[in-house]
Image (cartoon, rainbow, N blue to C red):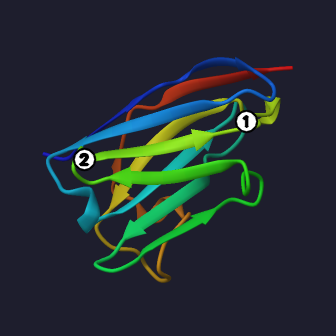
Amino acid sequence: QVQLVEHGGGSVQAGESLRLSCSASGFTPNDYYMGWFRQAPGKEREGVATIYVGVRNYYTDYADSVKGRFTISQDNAKNTLYLQMNSMKPEDTAIYYCAAAKSILYGVVSLRQDDYQYWGQGTQVTVSS
């Protein structure tokens, strides 16, 4: 049974950092496409960062709004996905979700939520100005 559990949400001030983690069980993350998504109040859920770890390389992609500030990474030995968030802004306030996909429709990685079959329960991140 595939299970994803997010940890590390909380409240920070603008400019500060926060690291989210996602513990995976029931599957091996390096066989899957992994991603972080977020949903702000009154807005649709959006892709934030994605990663696919291949045999020799890994591939990542980020939403334009977080490029240069957020970093996605994966520790296969711990079956854990991370999202390091630096220089945070109030507009980063949202519920953050971890997701996994065995395959995607096209591309080497995906920020399309419809590609993802498995989801965590989400963790709240609040950034105050």
* Residue 96 in the image, given as x and y percentages of width and height: 54, 36
Q: Earlier in the sequence, mark 1 or mark 2?
A: 2
Residue at the disc numbered 1: 92
Q: Give the structural element (helix, strand or loop) at label 2.
A: loop
Question: What amino acid is at disc 2?
Answer: Asn
How packed mark 1 is, by other alpha carbons closer than 10 Å (few <14, some 14-19, many 20 or more), is: some
Question: What amino acid is at disc 1?
Answer: Asp
Q: Give the structural element (helix, strand or loop) at label 1.
A: helix
Nearer the viewer's eye, disc 1 or disc 2?
Answer: 2
Name the side, left or right, on which 125 lies relative to 102: right
Q: Quadrant of the C terminus?
A: top right
Residue drawn 69% across the image and 59% down it: 63
The one nearer the camera, 67 or 32, is 67
Q: Which quadrant of the view contains residue 40?
A: top right
* Residue 98 in the image, given as x and y percentages of width and height: 43, 44
Residue drawn 33% across the image and 80% down it: 56
Residue drawn 59% across the image and 55% down it: 47
The one nearer the camera, 47 or 60, is 60
How packed mark 2 is, by other alpha carbons closer than 10 Å (few <14, some 14-19, many 20 or more), is: some
Height in image: 20 above or below 24?
A: above
Residue at the disc numbered 2: 79
